[in-house]
Image: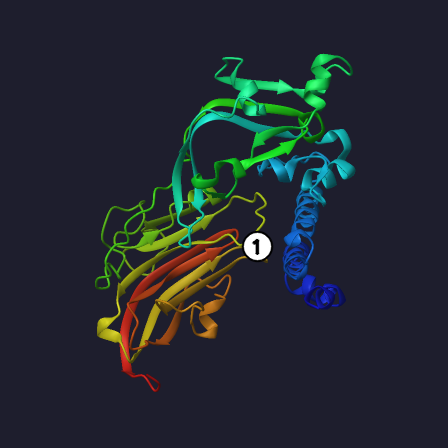
Amino acid sequence: RIGSWLDAHRGHCVGKTSADAFALARQHARVLAQYLEMTSSHVNGGSAVRDRAMADNVRWILEREGPAGKVVLWAHNAHVATHADFGVDWMGLHLRRALGRALVVLGFAFDRGRFQAVGATAERARTEWSVGAAPAHSLDGALARTGLPLLALDLRTVPEAGVVADWFAARRPARSIGAVFDPAHASAHLTSEVPARAYDGLLFVAETTAARPRFPPKAPKPPGEPTNLSLDAGPSGQPPAGWDVRDDARDHGYHVVTRSAGCRRRRCAMIERWDDQPHYGEVAAGMRQRIDAAPYRGRRVRLHAWASLETTDADASARVFIAPAGLALVLQAPEAFEMVRGEPWREYTAEVEVPADAAWLSFGLELGGIGRAFLDEVGLEVLASASRQ
């Protein structure tokens, strides 16, 4: 129904935002419909619907990239395979039908080593696992017997007839470890496949190492008191002292720094992004603080700050926000949600009633899209006891 409504009101939605914003919203509605179809399917646990949907979504991205666009996609060997098996047309097969030989599919194999996967126990915690040499009769074991630590094999050059052709055209077991691993049932992580039918090539690694997080998890800082609300502390040109900035902000083209030029007072904070590369999803960056909620529990708190937004991007938005921990919805005054474009400076306020069980308060400034957002003269005050506790 959401998709139908968007289709019926396309002109209105595009006029209020842009053609790109509408296309992304329409795709989000499509993904939601795909999910509902998958969860209601009783055939192979919805796998057939899932792989068809994944292929459709890849094609949508490719079409948006234009005639010269290219996509590199990583997925489990089963999903990229270009054949049907276990009653499922895998994503790779759907893409092969649509793209023909413009699609190149590489399967991965390994002999031994470490990897990360979710455990099969009730806790389902992500864990680092280790396995020994692959079974000798498996595809992985055969590749290991070459003695090569790394191997890239082009299956498109396999002869059409003869011993080599027969070997790659025969079904044989291959390692199939995905998101979940159960060391007590290692044999269950072998599947039967025909390499020449499934892939255009094979990439083999004799020994794997477990994936390492790009940004190792940080121990959360204990919530304290509001810090550097004046934004004067710390060196200019650096992220504001005492405020948190997402580690991956620069990956999305955002810069969060303090500066002196154009501020209301001596120093202000700026969030800036001019990278116009397409992003397929909600991308935003900001600065925030997390403070102890104990002094504010059961009371109404107001955040006020001066801010401005410079942008020519119709999809850009910025907000001043405050929220108690544990709430999924960020609460803010309506005028603080979309800052007025073009005004040099304007005071924004956001209020929230702090629940009696809140652990901390989070507040700050966020920017989504192309442009600059500025923050200055931040203040936090208690108004009164909350009307509801």
Tell me where residue 227 sits by quadrant: bottom left
Give the residue at x 68% y 19%.
167
Q: Position of residue 32 (x, y in %)?
A: 63, 60
Q: Position of residue 11 (x, y in %)?
A: 74, 64
Q: Against 184, is 142 above or below?
A: above
Q: Position of residue 368 (x, y in %)?
A: 50, 55
Figure colour scheme: rainbow
Q: Position of residue 378 (x, y in %)?
A: 30, 65
Q: Which residue is mark 1?
A: 313
Tell me where residue 357 sits by quadrant: bottom left
Which residue is at the front of the view, 187 or 298? 187
Which residue is at the front of the view, 151 or 103? 151
* Left or right of 184 on screen, residue 292: left
Residue 212, visible in the rendered structure: no
Task: Specify few, some or many for label 1: CA neighbours under 10 Å numbering under 14, 14-19, or 20 or more.
Answer: some
Q: Against 90, is 374 above or below?
A: below
Give the residue at x 47% y 54%.
284
* Quadrant that contains the C terminus: bottom left
* Left or right of 341 on screen, residue 154: right
Which residue is at the front of the view, 108 or 133? 133
Give the residue at x 56% y 52%.
281
Residue 49, visible in the rendered structure: yes
Q: Amino acid at mark 1?
A: Asp
Give the residue at x 48% y 40%.
185
Q: Against 26, is 189 above or below?
A: above
